Protein backbone atom coordinates (compact mmCIF):
# COMPACT_ATOMS: atom_id res chain seq x y z
CA UNK A 1 0.00 0.00 0.00
CA UNK A 2 1.27 3.47 -0.81
CA UNK A 3 2.57 5.45 2.16
CA UNK A 4 -0.04 7.78 3.65
CA UNK A 5 0.54 11.49 3.03
CA UNK A 6 1.54 13.60 6.06
CA UNK A 7 2.49 17.10 7.14
CA UNK A 8 6.16 17.93 6.83
CA UNK A 9 6.66 19.99 10.00
CA UNK A 10 5.01 21.20 13.20
CA UNK A 11 4.76 24.68 11.73
CA UNK A 12 3.03 23.18 8.71
CA UNK A 13 0.44 21.56 10.97
CA UNK A 14 -0.09 24.80 12.85
CA UNK A 15 -0.64 26.95 9.76
CA UNK A 16 -2.97 24.36 8.26
CA UNK A 17 -5.02 24.14 11.46
CA UNK A 18 -4.99 27.90 11.93
CA UNK A 19 -5.82 28.27 8.23
CA UNK A 20 -8.86 26.10 8.72
CA UNK A 21 -9.89 27.98 11.85
CA UNK A 22 -9.30 31.51 10.61
CA UNK A 23 -11.89 32.19 7.95
CA UNK A 24 -15.11 33.97 7.18
CA UNK A 25 -16.09 33.05 10.73
CA UNK A 26 -13.50 35.49 12.07
CA UNK A 27 -13.65 38.24 9.51
CA UNK A 28 -17.31 38.24 8.56
CA UNK A 29 -19.30 36.42 11.27
CA UNK A 30 -17.46 37.41 14.47
CA UNK A 31 -17.66 41.20 13.94
CA UNK A 32 -21.39 41.16 13.25
CA UNK A 33 -22.08 38.83 16.16
CA UNK A 34 -20.11 41.14 18.43
CA UNK A 35 -22.04 44.04 16.92
CA UNK A 36 -25.45 42.51 17.53
CA UNK A 37 -24.68 41.00 20.95
CA UNK A 38 -23.40 43.90 23.01
CA UNK A 39 -19.71 44.14 22.13
CA UNK A 40 -17.14 43.13 24.75
CA UNK A 41 -19.61 41.10 26.85
CA UNK A 42 -19.97 38.75 23.89
CA UNK A 43 -16.19 38.53 23.49
CA UNK A 44 -15.72 37.54 27.16
CA UNK A 45 -18.35 34.80 26.96
CA UNK A 46 -16.89 33.61 23.68
CA UNK A 47 -13.41 33.33 25.22
CA UNK A 48 -14.75 31.32 28.15
CA UNK A 49 -16.38 28.85 25.75
CA UNK A 50 -13.18 28.53 23.74
CA UNK A 51 -11.15 27.70 26.84
CA UNK A 52 -13.57 25.43 28.64
CA UNK A 53 -15.32 23.73 25.80
CA UNK A 54 -13.76 24.15 22.41
CA UNK A 55 -10.27 23.15 23.49
CA UNK A 56 -11.28 19.80 25.05
CA UNK A 57 -13.17 19.00 21.85
CA UNK A 58 -10.23 20.00 19.74
CA UNK A 59 -7.88 17.79 21.77
CA UNK A 60 -10.33 14.90 21.42
CA UNK A 61 -10.62 15.18 17.65
CA UNK A 62 -6.87 15.54 17.38
CA UNK A 63 -6.33 12.43 19.55
CA UNK A 64 -8.73 10.30 17.51
CA UNK A 65 -7.15 11.39 14.22
CA UNK A 66 -3.53 11.13 15.24
CA UNK A 67 -3.85 7.82 17.06
CA UNK A 68 -5.73 6.13 14.22
CA UNK A 69 -3.97 7.78 11.25
CA UNK A 70 -7.21 7.29 9.35
CA UNK A 71 -10.18 9.24 8.00
CA UNK A 72 -13.20 10.18 10.17
CA UNK A 73 -14.92 6.89 9.46
CA UNK A 74 -11.96 4.51 9.38
CA UNK A 75 -10.55 6.03 12.58
CA UNK A 76 -13.08 4.13 14.67
CA UNK A 77 -12.36 0.85 12.89
CA UNK A 78 -8.80 1.25 14.11
CA UNK A 79 -9.59 2.48 17.62
CA UNK A 80 -12.82 0.58 18.37
CA UNK A 81 -12.90 -2.40 16.01
CA UNK A 82 -16.13 -4.35 15.76
CA UNK A 83 -18.25 -1.54 17.26
CA UNK A 84 -20.79 0.82 15.74
CA UNK A 85 -18.62 3.87 16.47
CA UNK A 86 -17.72 4.09 12.77
CA UNK A 87 -21.18 5.43 12.11
CA UNK A 88 -20.38 8.67 13.91
CA UNK A 89 -18.04 9.28 10.96
CA UNK A 90 -21.12 10.10 8.89
CA UNK A 91 -21.82 13.10 11.13
CA UNK A 92 -18.43 14.58 10.21
CA UNK A 93 -18.78 13.88 6.51
CA UNK A 94 -22.28 15.35 6.46
CA UNK A 95 -21.23 18.30 8.64
CA UNK A 96 -18.36 19.17 6.32
CA UNK A 97 -20.59 18.76 3.30
CA UNK A 98 -23.25 21.03 4.81
CA UNK A 99 -20.68 23.69 5.67
CA UNK A 100 -18.82 23.74 2.38
CA UNK A 101 -22.14 23.92 0.51
CA UNK A 102 -22.91 27.39 1.83
CA UNK A 103 -19.34 28.42 2.60
CA UNK A 104 -18.44 28.20 -1.08
CA UNK A 105 -21.29 30.60 -1.85
CA UNK A 106 -19.92 33.24 0.53
CA UNK A 107 -16.43 32.39 -0.76
CA UNK A 108 -17.80 33.23 -4.21
CA UNK A 109 -19.13 36.57 -2.91
CA UNK A 110 -15.66 37.45 -1.60
CA UNK A 111 -14.26 36.81 -5.09
CA UNK A 112 -17.05 38.80 -6.72
CA UNK A 113 -16.26 41.67 -4.35
CA UNK A 114 -12.55 41.36 -4.96
CA UNK A 115 -13.32 41.75 -8.64
CA UNK A 116 -15.52 44.78 -7.96
CA UNK A 117 -12.74 46.29 -5.84
CA UNK A 118 -10.17 45.74 -8.58
CA UNK A 119 -12.47 47.36 -11.14
CA UNK A 120 -13.16 50.32 -8.79
CA UNK A 121 -16.86 49.70 -8.47
CA UNK A 122 -16.94 51.05 -4.92
CA UNK A 123 -16.34 54.70 -5.66
CA UNK A 124 -19.87 55.77 -4.66
CA UNK A 125 -20.21 56.54 -0.97
CA UNK A 126 -23.90 55.80 -0.70
CA UNK A 127 -25.18 52.97 1.49
CA UNK A 128 -28.39 52.68 -0.52
CA UNK A 129 -26.42 52.14 -3.74
CA UNK A 130 -24.00 49.75 -2.04
CA UNK A 131 -26.85 47.85 -0.37
CA UNK A 132 -28.43 47.54 -3.76
CA UNK A 133 -25.15 46.28 -5.25
CA UNK A 134 -24.94 43.61 -2.54
CA UNK A 135 -28.54 42.58 -3.13
CA UNK A 136 -28.11 42.40 -6.86
CA UNK A 137 -24.89 40.44 -6.50
CA UNK A 138 -26.21 37.75 -4.19
CA UNK A 139 -29.61 37.36 -5.82
CA UNK A 140 -28.32 37.13 -9.39
CA UNK A 141 -28.69 33.80 -11.21
CA UNK A 142 -25.26 33.98 -12.77
CA UNK A 143 -22.62 36.14 -11.05
CA UNK A 144 -22.48 34.36 -7.65
CA UNK A 145 -22.65 30.96 -9.35
CA UNK A 146 -19.70 31.71 -11.61
CA UNK A 147 -17.61 32.95 -8.69
CA UNK A 148 -18.68 30.02 -6.52
CA UNK A 149 -17.44 27.64 -9.21
CA UNK A 150 -14.11 29.46 -9.45
CA UNK A 151 -13.82 29.35 -5.65
CA UNK A 152 -14.43 25.59 -5.61
CA UNK A 153 -12.02 25.13 -8.49
CA UNK A 154 -9.21 26.85 -6.55
CA UNK A 155 -10.10 24.82 -3.43
CA UNK A 156 -9.91 21.59 -5.45
CA UNK A 157 -6.57 22.41 -7.06
CA UNK A 158 -4.97 22.80 -3.63
CA UNK A 159 -6.59 19.67 -2.18
CA UNK A 160 -5.64 17.75 -5.32
CA UNK A 161 -1.96 18.38 -4.60
CA UNK A 162 -2.29 16.55 -1.28
CA UNK A 163 -1.34 17.37 2.31
CA UNK A 164 2.30 18.33 2.18
CA UNK A 165 2.52 19.57 -1.39
CA UNK A 166 -0.92 21.18 -1.40
CA UNK A 167 -2.51 22.16 1.88
CA UNK A 168 0.71 22.71 3.86
CA UNK A 169 2.56 24.43 1.05
CA UNK A 170 -0.18 26.94 0.26
CA UNK A 171 -1.30 27.71 3.81
CA UNK A 172 2.33 28.39 4.78
CA UNK A 173 2.35 31.29 2.34
CA UNK A 174 -1.24 32.43 2.73
CA UNK A 175 -1.51 32.62 6.52
CA UNK A 176 1.41 35.01 7.13
CA UNK A 177 0.14 37.12 4.21
CA UNK A 178 -3.30 37.17 5.74
CA UNK A 179 -1.86 38.34 9.04
CA UNK A 180 0.02 41.22 7.41
CA UNK A 181 -3.07 42.36 5.49
CA UNK A 182 -5.41 42.28 8.47
CA UNK A 183 -2.90 44.29 10.52
CA UNK A 184 -2.58 46.90 7.73
CA UNK A 185 -6.35 47.27 7.45
CA UNK A 186 -6.69 47.49 11.25
CA UNK A 187 -3.96 50.14 11.43
CA UNK A 188 -5.82 52.25 8.86
CA UNK A 189 -9.11 51.82 10.66
CA UNK A 190 -7.59 52.70 14.04
CA UNK A 191 -6.16 55.95 12.73
CA UNK A 192 -9.52 57.29 11.54
CA UNK A 193 -11.12 60.12 13.55
CA UNK A 194 -13.15 58.89 16.53
CA UNK A 195 -11.76 55.40 16.26
CA UNK A 196 -11.82 55.20 20.04
CA UNK A 197 -15.61 54.77 20.06
CA UNK A 198 -15.08 51.49 18.23
CA UNK A 199 -12.44 50.43 20.74
CA UNK A 200 -14.79 51.24 23.56
CA UNK A 201 -17.44 49.09 22.01
CA UNK A 202 -15.06 46.18 21.53
CA UNK A 203 -13.45 46.29 24.94
CA UNK A 204 -15.98 47.70 27.41
CA UNK A 205 -18.45 44.96 28.34
CA UNK A 206 -22.15 45.71 28.59
CA UNK A 207 -23.63 42.66 30.31
CA UNK A 208 -27.16 44.09 30.21
CA UNK A 209 -27.31 43.00 26.56
CA UNK A 210 -26.55 39.37 27.39
CA UNK A 211 -29.46 36.99 26.80
CA UNK A 212 -29.68 33.23 26.30
CA UNK A 213 -29.35 33.94 22.58
CA UNK A 214 -25.99 35.58 23.28
CA UNK A 215 -24.81 32.37 24.94
CA UNK A 216 -25.95 30.23 22.03
CA UNK A 217 -24.44 32.57 19.49
CA UNK A 218 -21.14 32.59 21.37
CA UNK A 219 -21.04 28.82 21.59
CA UNK A 220 -22.00 28.25 17.96
CA UNK A 221 -19.35 30.76 16.99
CA UNK A 222 -16.71 28.95 19.08
CA UNK A 223 -17.48 25.69 17.25
CA UNK A 224 -17.64 27.27 13.83
CA UNK A 225 -14.63 29.49 14.26
CA UNK A 226 -12.32 26.78 15.59
CA UNK A 227 -13.54 24.30 12.94
CA UNK A 228 -14.47 21.72 15.53
CA UNK A 229 -17.21 19.10 15.39
CA UNK A 230 -16.98 18.41 11.69
CA UNK A 231 -13.89 16.27 11.51
CA UNK A 232 -11.36 18.76 10.13
CA UNK A 233 -9.13 18.54 13.20
CA UNK A 234 -9.56 14.76 13.19
CA UNK A 235 -8.62 14.56 9.54
CA UNK A 236 -5.68 16.97 9.77
CA UNK A 237 -4.63 15.18 12.99
CA UNK A 238 -4.47 11.91 11.08
CA UNK A 239 -1.66 13.36 8.95
CA UNK A 240 0.37 14.44 12.00
CA UNK A 241 3.32 12.38 13.25
CA UNK A 242 3.57 10.95 16.74
CA UNK A 243 6.14 13.47 17.94
CA UNK A 244 4.08 16.64 17.53
CA UNK A 245 2.57 18.26 20.60
CA UNK A 246 -1.23 18.00 20.46
CA UNK A 247 -1.89 20.27 23.44
CA UNK A 248 0.53 22.93 22.23
CA UNK A 249 -0.69 22.90 18.63
CA UNK A 250 -4.35 23.07 19.69
CA UNK A 251 -3.71 25.95 22.08
CA UNK A 252 -1.70 27.83 19.44
CA UNK A 253 -4.51 27.31 16.93
CA UNK A 254 -7.08 28.66 19.37
CA UNK A 255 -4.89 31.65 20.22
CA UNK A 256 -4.20 32.44 16.56
CA UNK A 257 -7.88 32.16 15.72
CA UNK A 258 -8.92 34.45 18.57
CA UNK A 259 -6.19 36.92 17.72
CA UNK A 260 -7.43 37.12 14.13
CA UNK A 261 -11.01 37.61 15.30
CA UNK A 262 -9.99 40.47 17.60
CA UNK A 263 -7.80 42.12 14.96
CA UNK A 264 -10.68 41.75 12.48
CA UNK A 265 -12.84 43.52 15.06
CA UNK A 266 -10.18 46.25 15.25
CA UNK A 267 -10.17 46.50 11.47
CA UNK A 268 -13.92 46.91 11.29
CA UNK A 269 -15.43 48.49 14.42
CA UNK A 270 -13.36 51.71 14.65
CA UNK A 271 -14.21 52.43 11.00
CA UNK A 272 -17.88 51.66 11.59
CA UNK A 273 -18.06 54.03 14.57
CA UNK A 274 -15.94 56.65 12.89
CA UNK A 275 -18.64 56.90 10.21
CA UNK A 276 -21.51 56.79 12.68
CA UNK A 277 -22.87 53.48 11.37
CA UNK A 278 -24.69 51.02 13.62
CA UNK A 279 -22.45 48.08 14.52
CA UNK A 280 -25.53 45.87 14.44
CA UNK A 281 -25.76 45.88 10.65
CA UNK A 282 -25.59 42.08 10.58
CA UNK A 283 -24.26 39.97 7.73
CA UNK A 284 -24.05 42.95 5.36
CA UNK A 285 -21.40 44.57 7.59
CA UNK A 286 -18.41 43.62 5.46
CA UNK A 287 -20.16 43.73 2.09
CA UNK A 288 -22.05 47.01 2.45
CA UNK A 289 -20.71 49.03 5.36
CA UNK A 290 -17.04 48.54 4.59
CA UNK A 291 -17.24 49.44 0.88
CA UNK A 292 -19.10 52.59 2.03
CA UNK A 293 -16.17 53.43 4.27
CA UNK A 294 -13.55 52.49 1.68
CA UNK A 295 -15.19 54.90 -0.76
CA UNK A 296 -14.45 57.80 1.59
CA UNK A 297 -11.03 57.31 3.06
CA UNK A 298 -7.62 58.03 1.55
CA UNK A 299 -6.19 54.88 -0.07
CA UNK A 300 -9.68 53.40 0.30
CA UNK A 301 -9.68 51.84 -3.17
CA UNK A 302 -6.42 50.08 -2.44
CA UNK A 303 -7.65 48.98 0.99
CA UNK A 304 -10.81 47.57 -0.55
CA UNK A 305 -8.70 45.34 -2.79
CA UNK A 306 -6.57 44.25 0.16
CA UNK A 307 -9.60 43.61 2.32
CA UNK A 308 -11.49 41.41 -0.13
CA UNK A 309 -8.30 39.60 -1.09
CA UNK A 310 -7.86 38.91 2.63
CA UNK A 311 -11.42 37.55 2.90
CA UNK A 312 -10.80 35.34 -0.10
CA UNK A 313 -7.56 33.85 1.32
CA UNK A 314 -9.16 33.29 4.70
CA UNK A 315 -12.08 31.50 3.05
CA UNK A 316 -9.90 29.29 0.84
CA UNK A 317 -7.66 28.05 3.67
CA UNK A 318 -10.86 26.99 5.46
CA UNK A 319 -12.68 25.44 2.52
CA UNK A 320 -9.72 23.17 1.73
CA UNK A 321 -10.01 21.68 5.21
CA UNK A 322 -13.73 21.04 4.72
CA UNK A 323 -13.11 19.35 1.39
CA UNK A 324 -10.23 17.24 2.77
CA UNK A 325 -12.56 15.61 5.34
CA UNK A 326 -14.80 14.32 2.56
CA UNK A 327 -11.96 13.46 0.19
CA UNK A 328 -9.96 11.45 2.74
CA UNK A 329 -13.12 9.55 3.63
CA UNK A 330 -13.92 8.67 0.00
CA UNK A 331 -10.30 7.93 -0.80
CA UNK A 332 -9.75 5.50 2.03
CA UNK A 333 -13.18 3.95 2.45
CA UNK A 334 -13.91 3.48 -1.25
CA UNK A 335 -10.32 3.15 -2.51
CA UNK A 336 -10.74 6.13 -4.82
CA UNK A 337 -7.85 8.14 -6.17
CA UNK A 338 -7.63 11.73 -4.92
CA UNK A 339 -8.85 12.92 -8.32
CA UNK A 340 -11.93 10.70 -8.38
CA UNK A 341 -12.70 11.51 -4.73
CA UNK A 342 -12.53 15.26 -5.42
CA UNK A 343 -14.61 15.00 -8.58
CA UNK A 344 -17.31 12.95 -6.86
CA UNK A 345 -17.39 15.35 -3.91
CA UNK A 346 -17.69 18.29 -6.26
CA UNK A 347 -20.75 16.85 -7.99
CA UNK A 348 -22.64 16.94 -4.68
CA UNK A 349 -21.11 20.18 -3.38
CA UNK A 350 -21.83 22.09 -6.59
CA UNK A 351 -25.45 20.86 -6.58
CA UNK A 352 -25.99 21.99 -2.99
CA UNK A 353 -23.96 25.16 -3.57
CA UNK A 354 -26.15 26.13 -6.54
CA UNK A 355 -29.27 25.59 -4.41
CA UNK A 356 -27.79 27.70 -1.58
CA UNK A 357 -26.82 30.47 -3.94
CA UNK A 358 -30.16 30.54 -5.77
CA UNK A 359 -31.97 30.52 -2.42
CA UNK A 360 -30.89 34.15 -2.04
CA UNK A 361 -33.02 35.08 -5.05
CA UNK A 362 -34.91 32.85 -7.48
CA UNK A 363 -35.43 30.00 -4.99
CA UNK A 364 -36.02 32.15 -1.92
CA UNK A 365 -39.54 30.76 -1.54
CA UNK A 366 -38.42 27.14 -1.41
CA UNK A 367 -38.22 26.24 2.28
CA UNK A 368 -37.06 23.20 4.23
CA UNK A 369 -38.37 23.26 7.81
CA UNK A 370 -39.01 26.97 7.35
CA UNK A 371 -35.49 27.81 6.12
CA UNK A 372 -34.27 28.56 2.63
CA UNK A 373 -31.48 26.26 1.40
CA UNK A 374 -28.65 28.54 2.52
CA UNK A 375 -30.00 28.97 6.06
CA UNK A 376 -30.92 25.30 6.24
CA UNK A 377 -27.32 24.22 5.58
CA UNK A 378 -25.99 26.93 7.88
CA UNK A 379 -28.37 26.12 10.75
CA UNK A 380 -28.23 22.32 10.53
CA UNK A 381 -24.45 22.39 10.55
CA UNK A 382 -23.88 25.04 13.23
CA UNK A 383 -26.75 24.09 15.56
CA UNK A 384 -26.93 20.33 15.11
CA UNK A 385 -24.13 18.58 13.23
CA UNK A 386 -21.14 20.41 14.75
CA UNK A 387 -22.30 20.10 18.37
CA UNK A 388 -23.24 16.47 17.72
CA UNK A 389 -19.84 15.77 16.17
CA UNK A 390 -18.11 17.48 19.11
CA UNK A 391 -20.25 15.55 21.58
CA UNK A 392 -19.37 12.15 20.12
CA UNK A 393 -15.67 13.03 19.92
CA UNK A 394 -15.43 13.86 23.64
CA UNK A 395 -17.60 10.90 24.63
CA UNK A 396 -15.39 8.56 22.64
CA UNK A 397 -12.14 9.89 24.07
CA UNK A 398 -13.46 10.34 27.61
CA UNK A 399 -15.47 7.14 27.96
CA UNK A 400 -14.36 4.66 25.35
CA UNK A 401 -10.60 5.16 25.21
CA UNK A 402 -8.34 4.17 28.10
CA UNK A 403 -7.18 7.09 30.24
CA UNK A 404 -3.63 5.92 29.77
CA UNK A 405 -3.93 6.02 25.98
CA UNK A 406 -5.44 9.49 26.12
CA UNK A 407 -2.55 10.70 28.27
CA UNK A 408 -0.12 8.98 25.97
CA UNK A 409 -1.47 11.04 23.06
CA UNK A 410 -1.67 14.29 25.05
CA UNK A 411 2.00 13.95 25.99
CA UNK A 412 3.08 12.31 22.71
CA UNK A 413 4.25 9.21 24.52
CA UNK A 414 5.87 11.21 27.33
CA UNK A 415 7.83 13.41 24.96
CA UNK A 416 5.99 16.58 25.93
CA UNK A 417 5.69 16.58 29.70
CA UNK A 418 2.56 18.06 31.29
CA UNK A 419 1.92 18.64 35.00
CA UNK A 420 -0.28 15.82 36.36
CA UNK A 421 -2.83 18.35 37.60
CA UNK A 422 -3.08 19.96 34.17
CA UNK A 423 -3.31 16.59 32.48
CA UNK A 424 -6.15 15.64 34.80
CA UNK A 425 -7.88 18.94 34.18
CA UNK A 426 -7.80 18.30 30.43
CA UNK A 427 -8.93 14.71 30.84
CA UNK A 428 -11.87 15.53 33.10
CA UNK A 429 -12.94 18.45 30.94
CA UNK A 430 -13.11 15.98 28.07
CA UNK A 431 -14.91 13.37 30.12
CA UNK A 432 -17.47 15.47 32.01
CA UNK A 433 -17.50 19.18 31.36
CA UNK A 434 -17.56 19.26 27.58
CA UNK A 435 -20.22 16.56 27.02
CA UNK A 436 -22.59 18.07 29.58
CA UNK A 437 -22.36 21.59 28.23
CA UNK A 438 -22.60 20.48 24.60
CA UNK A 439 -25.63 18.30 25.41
CA UNK A 440 -27.37 21.25 27.08
CA UNK A 441 -26.66 23.50 24.15
CA UNK A 442 -27.66 20.89 21.62
CA UNK A 443 -30.97 20.27 23.30
CA UNK A 444 -31.75 23.93 23.81
CA UNK A 445 -30.78 24.56 20.19
CA UNK A 446 -33.15 21.85 19.00
CA UNK A 447 -35.97 23.04 21.23
N1 LIG B 1 -13.44 27.98 10.95
C1 LIG B 1 -13.90 28.49 9.70
C2 LIG B 1 -14.20 29.95 9.84
O1 LIG B 1 -14.11 30.52 10.94
O2 LIG B 1 -14.55 30.57 8.85
C3 LIG B 1 -15.11 27.77 9.21
C4 LIG B 1 -14.98 26.30 9.19
C5 LIG B 1 -13.93 25.72 8.52
C6 LIG B 1 -15.88 25.55 9.84
C7 LIG B 1 -13.79 24.34 8.50
C8 LIG B 1 -15.77 24.19 9.85
C9 LIG B 1 -14.72 23.60 9.17
F1 LIG B 1 -14.62 22.31 9.15
Image (cartoon, grey):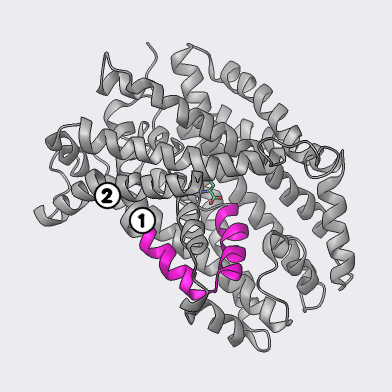
Report x, y in % for residue 308.
Answer: 71, 57
> Residue drawn at (77%, 40%), measured in percent from left and top?
359
Around disc 2, counting alpha carbons within 10 Å, would you say few (fewer than 14), some (14 to 19), or many (20 or more)?
many
Instruction: Name the residue that disc number 1 marks.
Output: 252
Q: Position of residue 425 (x, y in %)?
A: 18, 54
Instruction: Give 33 or 8, whichever is nearer the viewer.
Output: 33
Residue 28: in magenta span: yes
Dot 1 beta carbon under 8 Å from ligand 1: no
Residue bearing the label numbered 2: 247
Look at the image and give the residue range highlighted in magenta.
24-49
Q: Quadrant of the N terminus?
A: top left
Horizontal relation, residue 325 to residue 435: left or right? right
Q: Position of residue 419 (x, y in %)?
A: 11, 55
First in sequence: mark 2 or mark 1? 2
Above or below, comparing residue 339 to residue 117 in the picture:
above
In this image, 390 relative to 213: left or right? left
Tell me the CA gap for discs 2 and 1: 9 Å
213 falls in the magenta region:
no
Q: Residue at x 41, y 44 (%)?
A: 12
Q: The residue tagged with tag 2: helix, strand or loop?
A: helix
Extreme residue toward the front, this view = 447
Ligand 1 within 8 Å of disc 2? The answer is no
- Tell me, yes or no, if residue 170 can be seen here: no
Q: Secondary structure at mark 1?
A: helix
Amino acid sequence: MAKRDSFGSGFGVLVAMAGSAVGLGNLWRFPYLVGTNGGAAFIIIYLAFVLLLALPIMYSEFIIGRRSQANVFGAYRVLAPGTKWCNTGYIYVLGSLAIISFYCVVGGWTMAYLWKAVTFEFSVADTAVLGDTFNRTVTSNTEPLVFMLIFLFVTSIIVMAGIKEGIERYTKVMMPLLFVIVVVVAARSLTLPDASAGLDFLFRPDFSKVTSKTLLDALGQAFFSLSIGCGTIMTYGSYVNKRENIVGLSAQTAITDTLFAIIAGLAIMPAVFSFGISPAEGPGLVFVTLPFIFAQIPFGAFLAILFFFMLFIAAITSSISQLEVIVSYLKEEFSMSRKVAITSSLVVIVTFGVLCSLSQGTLSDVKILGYNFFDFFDKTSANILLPLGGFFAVIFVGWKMKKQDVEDELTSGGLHKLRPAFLNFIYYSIKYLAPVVVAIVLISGLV
